[in-house]
Image: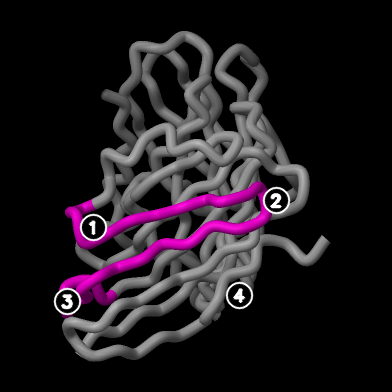
Amino acid sequence: AQTVTQSQPEMSVQEAETVTLSCTYDTSESDYYLFWYKQPPSRQMILVIRQEAYKQQNATENRFSVNFQKAAKSFSLKISDSQLGDAAMYFCAYTSGTYKYIFGTGTRLKVLA
Amino acid sequence: DAGVIQSPRHEVTEMGQEVTLRCKPISGHNSLFWYRQTMMRGLELLIYFNNNVPIDDSGMPEDRFSAKMPNASFSTLKIQPSEPRDSAVYFCASSWGAANTEAFFGQGTRLTVV
């Protein structure tokens, strides 16, 4: 069975600094997709970034980038130039051809002014 | 598009009562998911539908929970009878169906069973 693990329940970062959130997953599939979602206090789940497993190049979206290590089954999220609005819960998610999304337990990110 | 619409946003009910949560997915999406979020267990997939057909309901905790999708634009999650341990935020999400597309979430229903 596929699993997604986020080992950091909480992280803190100083405003304007860089922080990396960790995610590991387990799967026997060769083709799958990985996502990072952000959940601010409003509860709304917002897609931050996605990565296709067949692509070697790491995805980037403005200040957000991933470090995708397929062999190690690792998918970390790097947030550069952290802003107060980045404070939220961040969830790593996995899906394959079954379209079933599996989420990690989340990392709460605090941004310190 | 208005996004995934869930109702109600908040529900407080007494133990033993029936609760029905509603979801309108994004038009054109053919996959629909119900998730439950709690502090202890995080986001749990309860059930997902593809083309209105339940594909995997292995996450439904027990027979008190049931979900239906009578058409492509509407789904319900019913709890009967409700118990205090059912208190959680329930999310509905929909997607286009291809695995590389994101799941779009509603704003959730916060259920409190007293």
Would you call the spot at circle 1 few (<14 residues within 10 Å), some (14-19), or many (20 or more)?
A: few
Q: Is A58 on the left or on the right of B37, as rendered? A: right
| Image x and y of residue A6, in percent | 32, 45
Residue at the front extreme, as displayed: B70
In front: label 3 or label 1: 3
Disc 2 residue crowd, few under 14, some 14–19, many 20+, Cα 10 Å: few
Residue at 17% over, 82% down: B16
Badge 4: how crowded within 10 Å, few (<14), some, or many (20+)? some
Give the amino acid type for the residue marked by disc 3 in the picture: Glu
A15 w.r.t. A76: above or below? below
Disc with the residue nearer the chain's start (4 vs 2): 2
**Labels 3, 2: one chain:** no
To the question of a shared chain for discs 1 and 2, the answer is no
Q: Secondary structure at mark 1?
A: loop
Q: Which mark is residue A63?
A: 2
Identity of the residue drawn at 61% across and 58% down: B74
Chain containing mark 2: A
Rendered location of residue B4, percent (x, y): 66, 61
User: For residue B6: magenta?
Assistant: no
To which quarter of the image does residue B73 belong? bottom right
Seen from the viewer's position, the closer of residues B21 and B44 is: B21
Between the residue at mark 1 and the residue at mark 4, the CA separation in whole angstroms equals 27 Å
For the record, the magenta segment spans B61-87
Q: In the rendered image, which quarter contains the C terminus of chain A?
A: bottom right
Task: Reply yes or no: does residue B63 show up in magenta.
Answer: yes
Q: Which residue is mark 1?
A: B41
Q: Which is more N-terminal, label 1 or label 3? A: 1
Name the chain letter of the residue that bears numbered label 1.
Answer: B
Q: Position of residue A84 (x, y in %)?
A: 60, 75
Q: Please tell me whether mark 4 sits on a helix, a strand or a loop.
A: helix
